[in-house]
């Protein structure tokens, strides 16, 4: 039984109309050279994470600290039965650290090799960023890992490169157990 057999002709027409509207909006967005991104705040500055790189956002999560880990590892979190490492994105980028206390919001990102939860100070809105206004990161920029940045918008919002963050060798645990 096909899932479409459960819908009436009227309902199928409504679904088709909605799908066409979403496709038109995506097409318009691509023509306008915009990127949909989630805006976040770290150390009082605005950053943007491309929506396409985000798996899910969870609020009210607890982070369990892990001893003997690098400073950018805030701990681990149980996300729907999966234990994920939590990366303090501000510390990874070399920004001022804000202590983690109580329930926090986490942004889960991943690639074919791994998934991690990113801890940021504040999660904002979803916005369309004009890519034609994205400038290169200035050489004087005060971030330790400039390779994790795609560029800067005129309002100062910094677009993060999630795939570069996930490729960071510091995130790879390469310990042999004897």
Image (cartoon, rainbow, N blue to C red):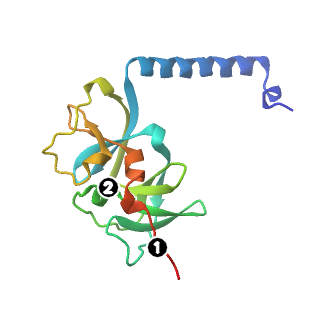
At x 73%, y 21%, the residue is 11
> Residue 111 — which label?
none
Disc 2 secondary structure class: loop
Q: How many marks?
A: 2
> What percent of the width, then of the height, locates residue 60?
46, 59
Q: Toward the viewer: 70 or 44?
A: 70
At x 46%, y 63%, the residue is 85
Residue 106 appears in which quarter of the rendering? Answer: bottom left
Number of other residues with Cα within 10 Å of mark 2, as a class: few under 14, some 14 to 19, many 20 or more? many
Provide the residue designation for mark 1: 175
Q: In which quarter of the image is the N terminus?
A: top right
At x 38%, y 66%, the residue is 73
Number of other residues with Cα within 10 Å of mark 1, as a class: few under 14, some 14 to 19, many 20 or more? few
Q: Give the answer, above or below, for where 43 lies relative to 66.
A: above
On screen, residue 94 versus residue 88, left or right, reads left
At x 61%, y 63%, the residue is 81
> Residue 121 — which label?
2
> What percent of the width, then of the height, locates residue 140?
12, 45
Residue 65 appears in which quarter of the rendering? Answer: bottom left
On screen, residue 174 versus residue 138, left or right, reads right
């Amino acid at each position: 039984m096909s899932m479409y057999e459960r819908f009436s002709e009227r309902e199928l027409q409504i679904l088709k109309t909605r799908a066409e509207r979403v496709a038109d909006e995506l097409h318009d967005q691509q023509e306008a050279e915009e990127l949909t991104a989630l805006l976040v705040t770290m150390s009082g500055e605005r950053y943007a994470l491309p929506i396409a790189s985000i798996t899910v956002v969870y609020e009210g999560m607890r982070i369990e600290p892990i001893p003997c880990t690098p400073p950018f590892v805030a701990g681990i979190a149980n996300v729907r039965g999966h234990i994920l490492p939590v990366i303090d994105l501000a510390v990874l980028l070399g920004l001022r650290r804000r202590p983690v206390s109580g329930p926090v919001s986490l942004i889960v990102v991943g690639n074919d090799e791994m998934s991690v939860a990113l801890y940021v100070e504040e999660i904002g809105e979803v916005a369309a960023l004009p890519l034609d206004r994205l400038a290169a990161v200035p050489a004087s920029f005060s971030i330790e890992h400039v390779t994790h940045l795609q560029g800067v918008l005129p309002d100062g919002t910094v677009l993060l490169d999630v795939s570069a963050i996930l490729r960071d060798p510091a995130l790879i645990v390469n310990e042999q157990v004897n």
